[in-house]
Amino acid sequence: MKKFIHQNSLSIVFFLLFLVAMVGQIIFGFHEYNNDLVDNGGTAIQISDYFSSGHFIEATFENWESEFLQMGLFVWFTIFLKQKGSSESKGFDGEEEVDREPSPNKKSVPWPVKKGGFWLILYKNSLTITLMLLFVISFFLHLYGSFKDENLFNSLKGKPEISILEYLGESRFWFESFQNWQSEFISVFAIVVLSIYLRQKGSSQSKPVDAPHEKTGE
C-alpha cells in the first residue's frame, strides 16, 4: 500500500482535492439553488434531487468543458509550436524523444505499438483525441444543464419555455463558456511565460534553478 501511494501520490492528492472541492460545490450550490428557487416563487428541493437539476449539471460541466479544452489544445499545440526559454516547450535543437517513431521491439511497450497499423495511429494521438472528446461531452452536458435551468426559471417567472436552438442564440450559454475559456487560456499563457524566468526547485514543470533564461524545455 505504501509503495502504491508513493508511486501514485501526485494523482491521489489531486483526486482528493477534486473530491473536497466537489463536495464544497455541492453543499454551497445546493443552498444557492434553493435560495434562487424560493426567491422566484418555487419550492426548495432535497439534495438528492439537486444532482439532476440543470443548476448542478451546468455548474459542473461548464468548468470541466474549459479544462479539457485547454488541456487538449495545449497538448496539440506543443507538437509544433514552441516558446524560447519555457520549460513547457520542446527545444529548438534537433529531434526530441517524444518525436521519434515508436519501436515495437522494446520491452513492455503498450499493445497498440506492437499491433501497429490503425491502432498505432490512434494510440499515437490518443491523448489529444481523448481530451477533446471529453471537451465535446462536457460542452453538450453544460449546454443541456444550462438550457434546463433557463427553462425552469422561465416557467417560474411565467415566461414561455424556449427550444434548445433558440437558447443557443442567446447570450447566457456563450457567456458561461467564454468566461471559463479565457481563464484557462490565460493560465496556460502564464505558466508558459513565467517558466522562462521563474523557477521551482524539484518541480518537473520548472527548469533547473541555475539554468539560463534562454534554455528551452526542462
Image (cartoon, rainbow, N blue to C red):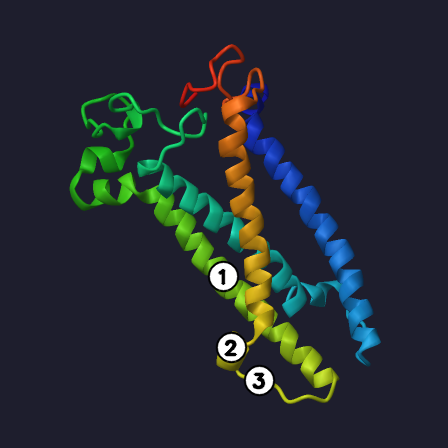
Cα–Cα gap, marks 2 and 1: 16 Å
Identify the residue shown where x is 53% and y is 33%: 191
Pick the quarter of the image with the N terminus. top right
Residue 139 is tagged as: 1
In the visual, does 76 lie left or right of 151?
left
In the visual, does 167 lie left or right of 129?
right
Identify the residue shown where x is 49% and y is 25%: 196
Check contact, mark 2 vs mark 1: CB within 8 A: no
Q: Residue reaching furthest left?
A: 117
Helix, strand, or loop for circle 1? Answer: helix
Q: Amino acid at mark 2?
A: Gly
Residue 198 is tagged as: none
Cα–Cα gap, marks 3 and 2: 11 Å
Residue 169 is tagged as: 2
Of labels 2 and 1, earlier in sequence is 1
| Residue 9 vertical position relative to residue 121 in the rendered view, above or below | above
Identify the residue shown where x is 64% and y is 60%: 59
Residue mark closest to the camera, 2 vs 1: 2
In the visual, does 26 lie left or right of 64?
right
Residue 205 visible in image: no
Identify the residue shown where x is 37% and y is 41%: 77
Q: Amino acid at mark 3?
A: Ile
Of labels 3 and 2, earlier in sequence is 3
Helix, strand, or loop for circle 3? Answer: loop
> Closer to the camera, 72 or 43?
72
Quadrant for residue 186, please give it.
top right
| Residue 110 vertical position relative to residue 118 in the rendered view, above or below | above
Which residue is under mark 3? 162
Quadrant for residue 20, please give it.
top right
> Closer to the camera, 179 or 144?
179
